[in-house]
Amino acid sequence: MNKRVKSAILVAFVLLLASCTENDSPTGTAAEPPVLVWSHSYGWGETYGIQVVDDGYLLLRSDYEIENNVYVGYVYIQKVDLVGNSLWQSQLFSELSVRIESCNPTWDNGFIITGSSEAESNIHRIFLAKTDAIGNLIWQRTYGDTADNSGADVVPCPGGGFIIAANRHMPYGSPTYEFGTLLMEVDENGDSLWSTLFDSVDVAGICLAPDGGFILSGSRPNFETMTSDLWVAEADNEGILLWEQTYNINETEYPISIEAAPEGYVILGQCEDMSSELKLFLAKIGHTGELYWSHEFAESDVNWGKQVRVTSDGGYAIVGQFRVPEIYISRGLFLKTTSMGYETWRLIIDEGAGTAICDVRETAIGGYILGMVGSGDVYLKYFE
């Protein structure tokens, strides 16, 4: 082989390497994790969600007060500035009879909140509440019937109003055990417009589809094998089922959240194998349900996911927690992946017993704000 041919081959090989991106690598491109810039604790409570606003951050959280020698929890919106100093907090409602499952920002920088509210005979009803950006509770509603109902996720609709994905189970002692996913749209005042039921599936998350429909993620249990598969479906803007798919990523899947992503959707969840190890999984599907890829992550034998967010570089930020072996306390887990789901870095965060990272948002300058709990306290942490 003459020198000219060898040189041409070498040039072609170099150009091929240069054309490869981090997403072509099964390990991604190693990168240094971001550095902690500031951290603030805000006292006892739980963290439900955060959002980025122009002059700081809004934190949806709970706090506790002593009433008649008893600790009583209340849900608050707390505003902090760009370096985490608390500016104000506004009480919304008591935690005694409300369990929050999901919250999302609204078009006016408020929150839309869903979960469950306890009614008579231990039956739960779907709970929905709307706030504004300065901490005022605009309205709250409950919805339900004789079944046990709980809101799993809620998102604003482009034309106004909200779409709720809820779980509906017949109460214990019913002649037959029936369950399903309730999809319901309400207007901007919380009045119900329509609802539809999908039988024998449990829902975990919902997001908007580019064609105006709604994408649901959940699980389809198999009671014979005592396992469940990942279930994803699309309904149109009147609740009519357009398509549905089930996926077997491992022995059992428990989806947690779903986000719209370039050319489809990304789903975070937990999966369990025959060894009973609980790992995180991240799966990317297309607009009509085709599975593009899935990856599993673990820091220990038991890992829990909380939230996934699409980042400005096309990758994904994942937060959650894991159980420390032998001592059985948890630590916070913060992962970053490429657009193909390959891990580039991870951070372990320790704020004492029960540490969990509950939400993450990317800021306009590429940093990350984390909402978390540890040793019973609420934290915000900012990384760049």
Image (spheres, rainbow, N blue to C red):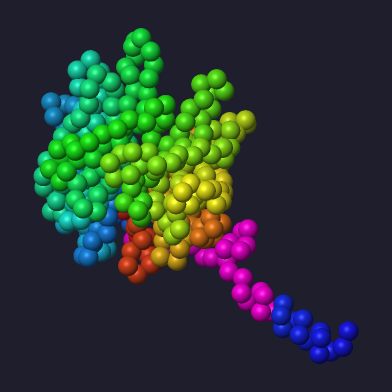
From the viewer's side, name the closer residue of 87 and 241: 241
Relative to 230, residue 9 above or below: below
Relative to 126, residue 330 above or below: below
Name the image quarter holding the C terminus: bottom left
From the viewer's side, name the closer residue of 379 and 281: 281
Q: Residue 184 lies in what quarter of the image? A: top left
**Figure label count:** 0
Residue shown at 66%/74% (left/top)? 17
Estimate the x, y position of residue 100 in percent, counting from the top left: 27, 36
Highlighted range, magenta: 14-38
Residue shown at 16%/54% (left/top)? 133
Residue pushed farthest bottom? Answer: 4
Residue shown at 54%/33% (left/top)? 252
Q: Residue 109 lies in what quarter of the image? A: bottom left
In the rendered structure, the answer to whether residue 64 lies left or right of residue 258 reads left
In the rendered structure, the answer to whether residue 48 lies left or right of residue 327 reads left
Residue pushed farthest right? Answer: 1
Name the image quarter holding the N terminus: bottom right
Residue shown at 38%/20% (left/top)? 178
Relative to 17, residue 173 above or below: above
Estimate the x, y position of residue 163 in percent, counting from the top left: 26, 43
Estimate the x, y position of residue 113 in percent, counting from the top left: 23, 42
Instruction: Tell me, yes or no, if residue 144 can be seen here.
Output: yes
Q: Residue 57 lies in what quarter of the image? A: bottom left
Instruction: Tell me, yes or no, if residue 59 can be seen here.
Output: no
Whether residue 384 is in magenta: the answer is no
Estimate the x, y position of residue 55 in percent, counting from the top left: 21, 65
